[in-house]
Image (tube, rainbow, N blue to C red):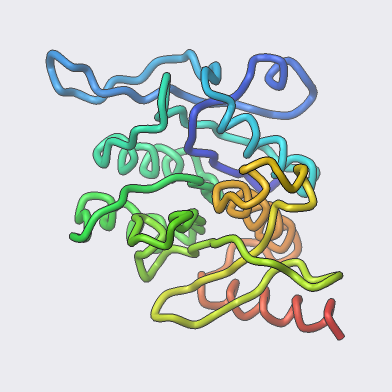
Amino acid sequence: MIKIGIIDSGINKGYRDGELEIQGVFLKRDEVTNEICAFENIVDQIGHGTECFKIISSISIGVSYYVVKVFDQEMVADIGVLAQAIQTCIDQNVDVINISAGVVSDKIPELLRLACDEAYDNNVIVIAAKHNSGSHCYPAHYIKVMSVGAADLVEGELYKYTSNGNIEFYTSARDLYPEHIVWSHSTSFACAKMTAYVANLLKLKGKIKMEQLKNELIHQNQIINK
């Protein structure tokens, strides 16, 4: 069974009481000791992680989940916590990691890059949202990460691909929300959609390298749009 890691704000309790296999952990930096601590409570206080889960689970059926809560009351990213969250997902043997968030920075956060490299070396696909404004955002701008942006699609099209130094896919959440809702234009939820498409492909192909996955996704899109 394909296992999806979701690094976000957790998941609402109601979804954990169902039939889906969902495990998880809450990672938080202690303000006194500065250590990253692990807690069992992954209840979503914001709704963002739950929304990503709802999108993924509506498209990809028959998968399990490992939820790493890294946001509590607000969507503020700690690079060390994000890096630890990726490592935790690797340790939990997930196949793909959804990160519908990121750190805006002019400099490459090396700690986060090393965690993404570790995932890549273990054939764990990291999928991260580009920033809504187009600003440089990590981990989406790392070479070994699949970055996802939001874009308009033609009828029947699932996603688009562009080659711009790293692996960039674009899809849309406009079919999920009313046009006036800002979430319909969000890269976060476009990212969740792309994660579901990748999970479905991995169910057919098994663990594969990022480059092969990219080629398979492009080929699949060409077949759909013929």
Give the x, y percent position of residue 187: 55, 53
Q: Position of residue 220 (x, y in %)?
A: 76, 76
Residue 42 placed where, x, y %? 51, 19
The answer to whether residue 220 is above or below residue 138 is below
> Where on the picture, by quarter, is residue 83?
top left
The foreground one among 116 and 108 is 108
Quarter-of-image position of residue 48: top right
Residue that sits furthest to the left in the current view:
33
Taking the spot 46% from the left edge, 14% from the top edge, the residue there is 40
Q: Which of 200/135 is in front? A: 135
User: Where is the C terminus found, in terms of image quarters?
Assistant: bottom right
The residue drawn where x is 34% and y is 56% is 118
Horizontal relation, residue 204 to residue 123: left or right: right
Count the numbered circles shown: 0
Name the residue at 33% across, 37% down. 77
Percent coordinates x, y for residue 200 in the rendering:
74, 57
| Residue under the point 41% across and 59% down | 140
Residue positioned most to the bottom: 226
Position above or below: 180 against 23: below
Give left or right: position of 18 versus 216: right
